[in-house]
Image (cartoon, rainbow, N blue to C red):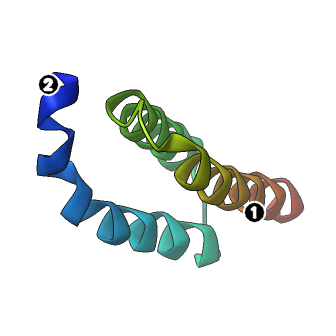
Amino acid sequence: MCAADVHLIMPHVPHIMAFIEQIAEDQEHPDAVVGATCGLIGSVLSLMNTNVLAVAVHIFIQLTLLVVIVSESQ
């Protein structure tokens, strides 16, 4: 997907973020889920190389919460 096609994913970003938030709020976080979530975050960021700062901050917060929750559950 090229930069000109970013508009195709923009309508889905809020749903992707909601999905990541649901994962972060879940009590069980297998390593595979955390790894896949990090991959999803990386994919979204790589597609959105424009206007990425606000999204990156939100994603970083979600990832931080996910990592904290995982480390507390172990």
Left or right for 23, reference 8: right
The residue indicated by pointer 2 is 1
Labels 2, 1: front one: 2
Residue 74's label in the rendered image is none
Dot 1 amino acid type: Leu
Relative to 6, is 18 on the left or the right?
right
Compared to residue 23, the image places residue 29 above or below, namely: above
Residue drawn at the location 62% of the way across and 60% of the way down: 58
* Mark 2 in CB contact with mark 1 (< 8 angstroms): no
Q: Amino acid at mark 2?
A: Met
Residue nearest the viewer, comparing 15 with 27: 15
Precedes in sequence: disc 2 or disc 1: 2
Q: Position of residue 35 (x, y in %)?
A: 53, 37
On the image, the x and y values in percent for residue 59 come to: 59, 53
Q: Is residue 19 left or right of residue 35?
A: left
Query: Circle 2 sits in a helix, a strand or a loop, which is it?
Result: loop
Image spot of residue 34 (x, y percent): 57, 46
Residue 14 is drawn in which quadrant?
bottom left
The C terminus: image quadrant: bottom right
